[in-house]
Image (spheres, helix red, strand yellow):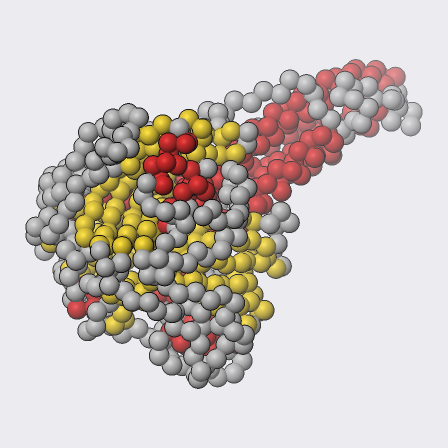
Amino acid sequence: MYTPKILAGLMSLLLLVSACSEEVSPTVSSAGEMDADGSELVLLQARLNDLQERAQRLRDTKEIKRLQRAYGYYLDEAMWDDLTELFTDNATVEYARDGLYRGKERIREYLYRLGDNRSGLATGQLNEHFQLMPVITLSEDGMSAQGRWRALILAGQYQESALWGEGPYENEYVKQDGVWKISKLRWYQTIMVPYNGGWGLNEDVNQGIYVSPDFPPDEPQTDNFGSWPETFLPPFHFDNPVGRYVPSESTTEGEGQ
Amino acid sequence: MNYPKPLLLICLLLTSLNARAQDDALLSLATDIARAEMEIQLLEDESEVENLQRIFGFYIDKHQWTQAADLFTDDATLEIGGSGVYVEKARILEYFKRMGAEGPQEGILNDHMQLQPVVHVSPDGTAKGRWHHFSQQAELRVSHFWGTGIYENEYLREDGVWKISKLHLYSTMRTPVDDGWRVTALPRSQPSEEFPPDRPASVDYENYPSVYVVPFHYEHPVTSPFVPNIAVEVLSVPTAETLAVELEELDHRLSRLEDANDIERLQTIYGYYLARNQWDELTGIFASDGTIEIAMRGVYRGAASIRRNLNLYGVQDELPGELHNHMQYQPVIHVADDGLSANLRSRAFSMMGSFGNQGRFMGGTYENIFVKRNGQWMMFKDQQINTYFAGTDDGWINLTRSSPPGITQSNPPDEPPTMQFEMYPKAFLPPYHYANPVTGRTEVVQ
């Protein structure tokens, strides 16, 4: 790939040469009869640069998806050390209503406490956390990104509990030395309810509180959301990509299912 | 123009240098373009492999065994649960056929969701993918199950077409709906005696309630990131015209990938807005002449009608004690060559209900159309075909024949429904917008 300096040098050389070639013609080149003059080459290079940049942005989006999905597979198996290594050194995590934990080592300890201070699942433990519905938004410079996801959860302990869970993430990512990492993880617990009776007949089992009573967070819960059957709309990091509808006449609301 | 002699000499010298420099510049540019071509190829490959696995899932749902088996290479292997390894396409087809008659069957639910892909493609035309498997299976008045698992699959590109070369589904958990995973954990499957596998199971493990970590095909993405080994070499000096044509073609291919990315994102955003009754936001993602047709309620055409249709599902932005989580999974996207329209098939899976009453699951299929206008993708046709509505505790076992909600007289559609269907336990195959990506077959094999 050309650096701008080399490009500038190449351009001025070609400009000088094309001035010369008015006198000394025809230009001879092994490239064939249709010769690339300087400006044409510069144009081609510019088009290539554009393609490379766009391809890189798509690759970044795909890498961020892989990163969050890898997070899900580690979480399924309570692989806390692998999970921790997905974060930047000064990342923050905030699950449900447990408050915010800052920095890799605090995150590691938080995760271990989630998993009863052991690495890997205990016998009879189910911890499926499907990572679904990515909406990834890359920054202009391609060095950071935001992502909304939804987790669908099947969790529990054989002979003790079975739970349905669900909730969206609003996460942030940064690229460091060419590698994407999670810099901020925020998960909103819509429901965490017993299998029997589901969300229709049960309130949230833990009101979104996991380990914070024994392991206080670095900062309290950063937003004002409660637990099922209370509902909350986690803010979107993105605007409507097409544009919100503006009604021209009044519509009748809520005519039932 | 008359140059002084020394300058003329310099010019003569430069002209010969010029030829060399131009050749070098062209060669260097051609090499960079070849590299970009390979990078774009890898992005296309990743999308095609994801489409392939998702297409496989939709075929399995509907017992389309021949269509599913045709997605495999001739010498592919298939290993599901503890059933052992079946080798070659013909044996794989036979394995599928022993799971039931070909084609969708009344009284049978066989939804197999293909979720959370982590796909890595190599420049040599091979790929590996890890997926989550989530299943809803039922036989009317006999049984119904939840299941989860992990795929670790391999893919091969043959003559430009991606195929599955190895499919390995590890069972994680399987339980009857009546009990759930607190009470009952079924063991993984055992090798068949009537139709024994060609090889024993490749790995010995027990599923839930035991713990088994399915080996990952990839290293840790942060501490050992995957870097495809791209090597390109351009030997002869191309003309600028050739390079311009190549760039044009790459731009075209990359644009279609960007389109697919935008469309998947838009369909997902649709799901988020739907989940919270954000009706004005949701209406806004449709083209001004777009349509919505949900659950045989008929076709609502144009923004005002679409907005009016959404009133059928609740009051805008108001959801106290309501769960209305409409998830969007497993998109199969095909963008038209001109980049102005696209089709998407995807899966609907919903968790719905009001606190105080039994909640419901809803399964279904979308066949949607998107259009690009003024450089912006928008939804043009939104059609959702329900597979079932089922109570969280009742499940599917005793569902009775029922049609989807249909037309609401007080808020009628602009046009009648375009498709008639009954939900499970009746069998219905929502038409595909695509042909089998390997054989090109479109008809349903009976």
Seen in the picture, residue B92 relative to B280 is either above or below; the reply is above
Quarter of the image with the C terminus of chain A is bottom left
Please name the residue shown 33% across and 46% down the image. B100
Residue A111, image x, y percentages: 18, 44
The residue most toward the right is B2
Please name the residue shown 53% across and 47% down the image. B442
Could you tell whether B399 is left or right of B265 in the image? left
Q: Quadrant of residue B362?
A: bottom left
Between A227 and A3, the residue placed more toward the observer is A227
Residue B427, image x, y percentages: 38, 58
Could you tell whether B309 is left or right of A257 in the image? right
Please name the residue shown 88% across and 22% down the image. A25
Q: Quadrant of residue A80?
A: top left
Residue B18, image x, y percentages: 75, 20
Q: Quadrant of residue B199?
A: top left
Residue A110 visible in the displayed image = no
Seen in the picture, residue A142 relative to B300 is either above or below; the reply is above
Residue B130, image x, y percentages: 34, 37
Between B262 and B179, the residue placed more toward the observer is B179
Between B26 and B173, the residue placed more toward the observer is B173
Residue B63 visible in the displayed image = yes
Number of numbered markers? 0
The residue most toward the front is B194
Between B129 and B75, the residue placed more toward the observer is B75
Please name the residue shown 40% across and 46% down the image. B102
Quarter of the image with the N terminus of chain A is top right
